[in-house]
Structures are given as structure tokens and as C-alpha cells.
Amino acid sequence: MTAPLLRIPPFPNARGQSLAQPDPNMELRLSDEEVDQISYALARAKVGGTYWGGQPALPPSPYILTRLTDSNVRADIFSKLRRDLPVVSWSCSASKSSRGGTARHYLVRGTLDPWHLVNGAVEVFVEADDELALIAAIAGVPVTCVGSGRFASLSTANARAVCDSIRRWAVNGLRYTNPFTGAPLTVIEAIELCSFWRKLIDSNRDISAAVGFAFWKRPTVAPLLWGGMSGPPFVSKPRSCAAGDKVAIWKSRTNPATLAKLEASVADLLEVEDGFIRSTGLGADCVPPLSIIVDRLGVYFDPTRPSELELAIQEGNFSADIRDRAKQLRALIVELGVSKYGAGTAPINRSAFARHLLVPGQVEDDRSVICGGGAVSTNLELLRRVRDSNPDAYIIYKPHPDVEAGHRTGAIPDELCLTLAQSIVRSSSISSLIDMVDEVHVNTSLAGFEALLRGKKVTTYGVPFYAGWGLTHDFGLIPRRRTARRTIDELVAATLLLYPRYLDPVTGLPCPPEILIQRLAEGATGRKSGPVIQLRRLQGRVNLAISKILAR
């Protein structure tokens, strides 16, 4: 069966999915103008065919592009080509791309990106049954089709032939389905989804190595760092780096000697960290993340230098559409009670006190505290500052789940904690607590951002990424770079729509945040509680028991 023009890239570890299914009863009566819009959308997004394929080095434009399997036909065509132009011949006989040929004849092999190949071509010679003919015609490159086949009419190079080919091979006889929901898609919506995947793949093509990624993270991170036909190459120690090399690195999990070597090298480091909507379990328990961030400037929790997130918030190029989408996303998160480590809310009864304050604890040696905590480096110091500033408030303290699990530092003995807070809450979800209280006071905790989503007053004592934009009351030293004033929906647009990458735990495909949020609310995790997770949880319980014995 002939593959449809629009298809899902073969992301690592993804379940078998199809974007377009044959349906002989599907016939849309589209006008030429509507088909032109489809053609324009395809050309703008550069999707169709193997758009995830390799992008080999090519001669400077202009050149002639050929893909012909019959050697006799190929020889005949070559004898008639212009001698003043180089020729790029694409062969699919090899599994990997490689460069061959002569100074005027470039031979490229393997699964390649057809849009990359036609970009500099001034003419394409191809067999009449090859989808490259349609892609070249959509891109506006003259096509000569050899033999008979479904695209033979494109040799005439007129708009009617292009429209008819799009109708026949990308519209009629095909039913497009959303791989995440099973809902019908229009052709334009299918193009937009392919465009989403293409942008992700293109952003990863220059990554030469991925360092510091634990083995249990790699299956879910791999699709989000996949650069098409290659990568990401997970290594513990990268080879010697050259200028221009791009290395994705999880710094907190990289060997110090390796990290020092990389930071002293000429390579560009791309910081990778957990996303803001992560999973239904703890990273400390070896539950892999379902979202990550990849930052080429810095990292969002380090206020001493710019990050891609800070730049996006500061520049504020938010269209009306993305602001509206952010508003709807925020409403969905609040409705479903989604937070970084899970979903769900349950009403909590309040005491008779007028003002309830929530103080979330953090992991004290976490990089966000070290980089952005400023004068506040411990949970006890945070509690003292909140109490000093709010002597009459009812303060609720929620320990960090990684600390409670016995994996990380930051525990406060209960008797000491209760000299500053009225209660310690462990079992209730952070979303439920935020819903119940009047204000949230944080050092750099993500709980402050989650409180902003829910319309709560937020006071920061360190410098989290969401401080300094006019939405919080800040005691920390805000960088002078942060001069813009943003609405909550603009902050959400930058933080949850533009910055992170998300993976659907059901299909294994990169997905928009709305899909992951819905999956988490439904309880889908995409992983089993295997021996590594169980062992890690047992280790945490042992560590916690030992720490309690030593504290006596």
C-alpha cells in the first residue's frame, strides 16, 4: 500500500500510530482556493514525505535534483542535463545517508528530508510514481516525471495539476485521525500537527551528544531529543568536543570531572531539566519525566544569567491566539488539579483563622535553591521569615515529597516546625492546599507558580522564574533584566506552551501540554512500578528511618 503524504515520524519508543487511514468513502468537495491553502500550508510547514529524514551537505544553489532507480533512464537523463549546474542524486538504497560522487555530481543516500533537498534545486527529475514529485511541485520547483505513475501530470508544472494531485493523494480517500484522542482531523489540522513534530525534530538536529541522563530516564527523554534519523547519542563521557558541537546535559546528574571538562571545552552546552508538569511520581524514586526543558542560554531557575524562558517572558511576543490558548490551558489545569507530580484535588476544611498561608518546603541542595534562594537557603529559615512577616497568620507547612520520601535534604523536626507553623500537612495534594489557603509563601518553589495559576497571592523570598513580572510580592533581589509587566496568561504562554517539551505516556509521541495534562488527570503514567522504582522507594524509607533515629 502506498504511504500517505502526511505521516507520523518514527520517534524512538513510540507505539505504532497512523495519522491517515484509507477511506474510499472520504471525498471532500474542496474548491481550488481551499486546496491552494492546503498547498501553502504544506510548503510553509515543510511536511509531507520523510520530513524527519537526514539533511546532508549539498552544493550551493542552484543545482539539479534527481531520484531515478533505472540506470538506463538515469544515464539518458544525465546526458541531457545542463553542464553548468551540479547534480544531486538521491538514492534510497542505503539505510544511512552518505556523500559520494564527484565534484559536479553529489550522491546522497538513505532516508532524507525531501524539503531540504528541493530547497536549493532549480529542477527535479523523478519517476512519475515518486512522492518527491508532488513535494517539489508544492515547493514551486519545476518537475520532470519519467514514465507513468500517479504524479505524471506534474510535468506540466501548472497549478491545476498540483491541485488535482493534492486532492487525490492528500485529501480524498484518506481519513485523518488525531493519534492522541482518536478524533477526526481536517487536513490543515494534520499539517499543523506534523509541523509541531517537525519543529521539535529540527531543534534537535545539531545535538551531538547527551550527557548525564540516567538509564531509567532515557526511554521517555529520547523522543523529545530525537533529531530525525539520528540521536540522541546518550553517553557517560563525550568524545573530545569541537567548536560548534552542541551537547545536551543534565548537569546535576553528570560526573563532576566530566562536567568540568565540558564547561572548559569549546562545545555549547544545552541544559536539560524536568518540566513543570512532570509525572505522577517522584524523580527521586526513578519515575521518568514526561516533560523536559532544553535551554541553550542558561536554565530557568538560575537568575544570575538569562535563560530562554526569561527571554520569552521579557520579549512578550504573544499573539492573541496563544494568549487565548494559555487561558484555556490554565483553566484546564485548575479544573483537573494538575501539579508537577500528579493530579487531583479534594476539599480541605479551614480553621477559624482569617488568613491561611501555605509554605511549601524544598530540597535544600536543589540547584534552584542554590542558584535562586539568595539569603534563604533552608526551609527552617524560610518558615522563620514567613512567621516574622505574618505574626497573626495561620501557617501550614508542607514538606517536599522528595524529602518526605527520604531521598533528599531539607527535613525539619516536627516539634521545631510547629513552633513556627500551626500545622504540618503531608498527605493532601499541593493543589488542594493551594485551593484552600489565601496566600502562598515560597523560596523558589514551583508551588508559587501553581498558586498564580489559581489566582492566589504569592510572596517570594528567593528569585524564582515567575518573580519580578508584576504578579508576585518579592523579597528577593530581582535581576534588572526583568523590566516587563506580564499578565498571568502571558506567563503561562511562555512557561507551559513555548518552553517545555511533553511526551504522551499512552502513544509515546511528543504532544502538546493539553494532552499530557489530560493523561495525568486520567491516571495514565506510561510506565510500570518496576524493580528500580520499588528499590528506590525502599531505600528512601530506610534513609528516613535512620534520620529519625539519629535525630532523637
Image (cartoon, helix red, strand yellow):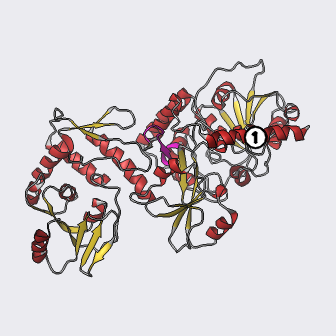
The relative height of residue 280 versus residue 109 in the rendered view (above or below) is above
Q: Which residues are magenta?
A: 496-507
Q: Residue at x 9, y 75 (%)?
A: 80
Residue 522: where, in percent of width, then height? 50, 28
Horizontally, is 387 left or right of 401 in the view? Answer: right
Residue 507: where, in percent of width, then height? 42, 39
Q: Residue at x 36, y 50 (%)?
A: 9
Q: Residues within 10 Å of mark 1 (few under 14, many from 20)?
A: many
Residue 331 visible in the displayed image? no
Return the residue nearer the eye: 84 or 148: 148
- Residue 488 located within the stretch drawn in magenta: no
The relative height of residue 61 versus residue 25 in the rendered view (above or below) is below
Residue 290 visible in the displayed image? yes
The relative height of residue 10 versus residue 520 in the rendered view (above or below) is below
Q: Residue at x 89, y 41 (%)?
A: 550
Residue 99: where, in percent of width, then height? 32, 73
Q: Secondary structure at mark 1?
A: loop
